[in-house]
């Protein structure tokens, strides 16, 4: 365990510049590859069935390719390093959609339950800190609804216009006031859970875990879970985004599981702050204890923001995760077959071409 964490605090910047030798890139940019089946079969961005077999040589699935997990903070106000305006957030969603990315939940990524349509690339959205602009209430006919200019409202609206994009995001909140409107905490947490979004652990007080010992970490993580479960009985808070992206090596094991005053917690993945795409969950080198994220920003990201990585994958389509459309089959290129993490396969089949 210690070894796994020995590089937890390091910043990983994987910027492979090897050139790509196939021609898939043109398809990626122009959308020439058609998903299997009729449009009516696609619900929630996922195919219910693949009525036609996928031609691997045409679709070029690459389920060992990399996946972007985007990290947002405040939505609203004036654009800055950690703030995205509503219009820029809409622009991001449109850019992802146009470039053939489709939303999946973090849990589906971690579980290898990737139902993204053949030829398309899964992408995960995460929001840290539970700021007001992520989920603001607007009263409509006397009832609270997500403000259409808050992240949740924007996501719902985009999904309505583009149902094949999917609808998923994980919100990493802390207490005592997630989303900053005290009368609506309960409404918001229930709304998220009931509408396909996930709620993750961002500690109880947004504490830097690198300054705490094991007991301190247990208190921060356990209290977060207890408070979320006060609103959502039995809710499984199972992923953690590290505030400030760090923890001391000595106590890193406490991130995975522990308990505080009778409230147990567990995390199946620990998300870092920055700075590159994640390896595929099927890749033997994928490490769920240090999952990197990409800063969804265009300011002060030193060439490593969302549009830099979108451009990178346009230029290096062979690095990008391309789904075969079937969550039960992991399809990889022949030269990469030995890189698959066999323990992720369970009942899945592996296919190469
Ligand atoms: Zn934070």
Image (spheres, helix red, strand yellow):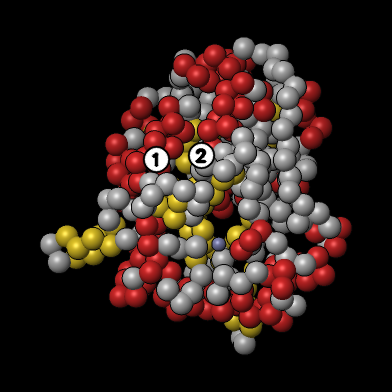
Query: How packed is label 2: few (under 14 Cα within 10 Å), some, or many (20 or more)?
Result: many
Q: Is residue 134 above or below residue 189?
A: above
- 283 or 29: nearer the viewer: 29
Q: Does any atom of ligand 1 lie closer than 8 Å to the CB of label 1?
A: no
Q: Going by the picture, which residue comes out furthest to the bottom?
A: 261
Query: Label 2 near label 1: C-beta < 8 Å?
Result: yes
| Residue 302 falls in image quadrant | top right
As measured in the structure, the alpha-carbon distance from the residue carrying label 1 to the one carrying label 2 is 10 Å
| Residue 164 falls in image quadrant | top left
Query: How packed is label 1: few (under 14 Cα within 10 Å), some, or many (20 or more)?
Result: some
Query: Do we see residue 24 in this rendering?
Result: yes
Residue 141: image location, x then y, percent: 13, 62
* Point 63% across, 53% down: residue: 273
* Point 17% across, 60% down: residue: 140
- 228 or 204: nearer the viewer: 204
* Quadrant where the image shows the N terminus: bottom right
Along the horizontal axis of the image, is 217 left or right of 37? right
* Point 65% across, 22% down: residue: 316
Along the horizontal axis of the image, is 74 left or right of 55? left
- 47 or 174: nearer the viewer: 174
Disc 1 element: helix
Residue 148: image location, x then y, percent: 27, 50
Residue under circle 1? 88
* Quadrant where the image shows the C terminus: top right
Query: Do we see residue 342 in this rendering?
Result: no
* Point 28% across, 62% down: residue: 137
Disc 2 element: loop
Circle on res. 298: 2
């Amino acid at each position: 365990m210690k070894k796994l964490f020995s590089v937890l605090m390091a910043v990983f910047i994987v910027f492979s510049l090897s050139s790509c030798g196939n021609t898939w890139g043109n398809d990626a940019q122009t959308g020439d590859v058609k998903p299997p089946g009729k449009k009516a079969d696609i619900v929630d961005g996922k195919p219910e069935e693949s009525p036609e077999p996928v031609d691997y040589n045409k679709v070029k699935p690459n389920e060992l390719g990399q996946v972007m997990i985007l990290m947002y903070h405040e939505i609203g106000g004036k654009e800055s390093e950690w703030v995205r305006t509503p219009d820029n957030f809409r622009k991001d969603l449109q850019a992802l959609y146009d470039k053939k990315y489709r939303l999946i939940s973090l849990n589906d990524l971690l579980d290898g339950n990737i139902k993204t349509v053949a030829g398309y690339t899964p992408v995960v959205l995460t929001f840290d800190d539970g700021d007001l602009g992520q989920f603001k209430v607007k009263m409509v006919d006397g009832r609270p609804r997500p403000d259409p200019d808050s992240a949740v409202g924007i996501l719902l609206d985009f999904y309505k216009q583009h149902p094949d994009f999917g609808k998923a995001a994980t919100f990493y909140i802390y207490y005592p006031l997630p989303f900053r409107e005290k009368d609506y905490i309960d409404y918001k947490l229930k709304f998220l859970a009931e509408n396909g979004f996930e709620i993750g652990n961002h500690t109880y007080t947004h504490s830097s875990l690198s300054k705490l010992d094991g007991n301190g970490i247990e208190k921060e993580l356990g209290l977060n879970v207890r408070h979320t479960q006060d609103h959502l009985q039995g809710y499984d808070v199972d992923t953690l985004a590290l505030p400030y992206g760090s923890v001391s090596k000595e106590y890193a094991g406490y991130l995975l599981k522990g308990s505080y005053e009778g409230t147990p917690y567990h995390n199946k993945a620990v998300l870092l702050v920055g700075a590159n795409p994640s390896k595929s969950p099927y890749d033997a080198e994928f490490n769920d204890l240090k999952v990197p994220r990409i800063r969804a920003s265009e300011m002060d990201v030193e060439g490593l923001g969302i549009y830099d990585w979108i451009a990178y994958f346009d230029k290096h389509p062979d690095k990008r995760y391309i789904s075969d459309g079937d969550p039960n089959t992991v399809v990889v290129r022949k030269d990469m077959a030995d890189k698959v993490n066999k323990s992720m396969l369970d009942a899945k089949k592996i296919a190469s071409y």
